[in-house]
Image: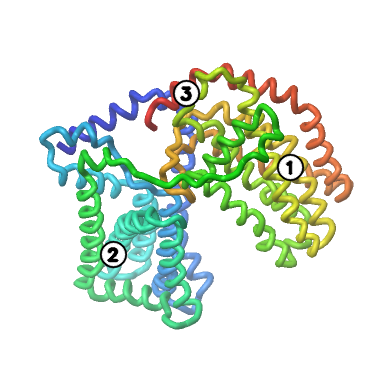
């Protein structure tokens, strides 16, 4: 049966129309995968020499175990943000004489084959080989290595438990923050030395291999919990139940002053406020507003105008970046219906532009208190805001014409990469790097004032050419209209 499941998923993946349209993304993902594999291999083979050079008077094996706590914390956080439980289309299978337990075991077993589980092995196994080659007893290192592999699998299933808890709250990363914060707080405030506790635990397994039954038992508990939760949800009628929610109405009459684009703006604002996924784009504006405090409170960054150019673009354009990169995928659920209406495409796109422009203006105004760190910081933010309106907003709209992945607005809000394609990864380069490069060159060869003036000048040029740019972008969307309708009609 497992072989049959694999065959079905193989056909579903390669027969999907998106497979041929995402060839560039697949190549990019393979490149990044190979890059990280090489990096972890280098770490695995070189870590022993690094530890010997950094701590010449201490046992490198003991030092390595002292860092395992931070590795576990980092792995849990990275998996929460990036790794998702593998899924399969189970509705057709539920009407067939197939055991639910078989389906659940397959899904959980598939998660164990995740790239996130294989990647640490490229560091763990070479480092273990280097330790044995350096004279450490294999009877000591091998149980330690298998214990680390078990911990990788424990983190894999623990991540799904944390995600299940996070889906029940409007603050999806709260359970993770509590979990990681408590552990780190115990270490930071010296209540419990987590580094020593975790390090001694692994050293204990190395010295007494019988203790490896402890991580085995924890792994079995995590697997069992995930199995029970998924099996309880695997019913055909559970997918037929409708969720009744209270719609929160708001007075959006102020948008009427924008004329013929007001209905589209109201639609976007309601979409943002009523869905978890889009709501995070609004809440993350708080992070963008406070982003400068991480830099400007440190003298090394406060005096760096290059850092100010980056912070300015990111802080004033945080909503533009997070919301704009998924235009028009936000409307993918009803995009076919929207395109069948007697509306002008330019009105639809112009409403997105006005929304992004307003967000940039609001973020700049709210960021005026950064004047406390110097007038150059405020001028940099102003130049970045003009650049975001005149250039980055148009880049975002143009990049959206290449979006071909449907977005499920009901999925969890923060750090959800469902619907993310090659466009989102590639478009980040010109958005963030180009203004930094332009300012850096002008500032280095001429001066700060010229660097700011160049950014403002480019932004103003984009604003002046707005109508021509919108006609060009609208034509691009019109040419891609039916391709997007076809792509949004399919499950990713």
Task: Give SS at disc 2.
Answer: helix
3D distance between C-alphas at marks 3 and 1: 38 Å
Q: Which mark is residue 337?
A: 3
Residue 454: quarter of image:
top right
User: Is residue 332 left or right of 356 when viewed as pictured?
Assistant: left
Q: Residue at x 13, y 33 (%)?
A: 96
Residue 365 position, x and y percent, is 75, 52
User: Is residue 456 left or right of 271 when viewed as pictured?
Assistant: right
Residue 385 position, x and y percent, is 75, 45
Answer with mark 2 or mark 3, whichever residue precedes in sequence.
Answer: 2
Answer with mark 3 or mark 1, whichever residue precedes in sequence.
Answer: 3
Give the colouring mode of the picture: rainbow
Answer with mark 1 or mark 2, whichever residue precedes in sequence.
Answer: 2
Q: Residue at x 57, y 45 (%)?
A: 250
Instruction: State the residue in front, 414 or 67.
Output: 414
Q: Residues within 10 Å of mark 3 (few under 14, many from 20)?
A: few
Q: Residues within 10 Å of mark 1 (few under 14, many from 20)?
A: many
Front position among marks 3 and 1: 3
User: Is residue 322 left or right of 443 when viewed as pictured?
Assistant: left
Front position among marks 1 and 2: 1
Which residue does the numbered mark 1 point to in the structure image?
435
User: Contact (CB < 8 A) between labels 2 and 3?
Assistant: no
Q: Residue at x 35, y 77 (%)?
A: 200
User: Contact (CB < 8 A) between labels 1 and 2?
Assistant: no
Q: Which mark is residue 147?
A: 2
User: Contact (CB < 8 A) between labels 3 and 1?
Assistant: no
Task: Give SS at disc 3.
Answer: helix
Instruction: State the residue in front, 331 or 200.
Output: 331
Instruction: State the residue in front, 70 or 186.
Output: 186
């Amino acid at each position: 049966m497992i072989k049959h499941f694999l065959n079905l998923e193989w056909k579903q993946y390669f027969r999907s129309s998106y497979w041929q349209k995402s060839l560039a993304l697949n190549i990019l993902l393979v490149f990044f995968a190979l890059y990280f594999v090489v990096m972890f291999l280098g770490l695995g083979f070189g870590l022993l020499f690094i530890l010997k050079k950094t701590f010449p008077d201490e046992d490198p094996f003991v030092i390595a175990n002292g860092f395992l706590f931070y590795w576990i914390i980092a792995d849990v956080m990275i998996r929460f943000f990036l790794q998702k439980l593998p899924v399969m289309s189970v509705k057709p299978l539920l009407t067939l004489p197939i055991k639910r337990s078989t389906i659940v075991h397959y899904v959980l077993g598939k998660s164990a084959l995740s790239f996130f589980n294989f990647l640490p092995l490229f560091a763990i196994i070479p480092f273990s080989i280097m330790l044995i080659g350096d004279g450490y007893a294999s009877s000591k290192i091998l149980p330690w290595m298998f214990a680390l592999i078990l911990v990788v699998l424990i983190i894999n299933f623990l991540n799904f438990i944390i995600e299940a808890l996070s889906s029940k709250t409007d603050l999806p990363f709260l359970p993770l923050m509590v979990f990681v914060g408590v552990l780190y707080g115990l270490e930071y405030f010296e209540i419990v030395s987590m580094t020593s506790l975790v390090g001694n635990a692994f050293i204990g397994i190395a010295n007494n291999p019988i203790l490896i039954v402890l991580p085995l038992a924890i792994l079995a508990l995590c697997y069992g919990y995930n199995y029970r939760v998924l099996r309880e949800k695997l019913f055909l009628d559970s997918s037929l139940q409708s969720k009744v929610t209270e719609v929160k109405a708001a007075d959006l009459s102020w948008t009427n002053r924008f004329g013929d684009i007001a209905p589209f703006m109201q639609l976007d604002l309601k979409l943002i406020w009523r869905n978890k996924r889009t709501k995070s784009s609004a809440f993350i504006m708080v992070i963008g507003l406070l982003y400068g405090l991480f830099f400007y409170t440190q003298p090394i960054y406060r005096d760096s105008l290059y850092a100010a150019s980056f912070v300015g673009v990111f802080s004033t354009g945080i909503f533009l970046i997070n919301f704009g990169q998924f235009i028009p995928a936000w409307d993918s659920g009803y995009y076919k219906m929207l395109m069948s209406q007697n509306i002008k495409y330019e009105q639809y796109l112009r409403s997105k532009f006005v929304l992004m422009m307003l967000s940039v203006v609001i973020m700049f105004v709210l960021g005026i208190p950064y004047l406390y760190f110097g007038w150059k910081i405020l001028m940099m933010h102003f130049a970045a805001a003009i650049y975001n309106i005149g250039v980055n907003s148009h880049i975002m709209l143009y990049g959206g014409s290449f979006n071909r992945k449907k977005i499920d607005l009901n999925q969890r809000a923060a750090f959800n990469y469902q619907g993310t394609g090659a466009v989102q990864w590639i478009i980040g380069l010109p958005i963030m790097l180009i203004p930094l490069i332009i300012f850096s060159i002008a500032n280095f060869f001429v001066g700060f004032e010229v660097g700011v003036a160049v950014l403002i000048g480019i932004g103003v040029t984009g604003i002046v050419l707005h109508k021509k740019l919108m006609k060009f972008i609208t034509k691009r969307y019109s040419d891609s209209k039916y391709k997007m309708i076809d792509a949004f009609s399919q499950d990713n």
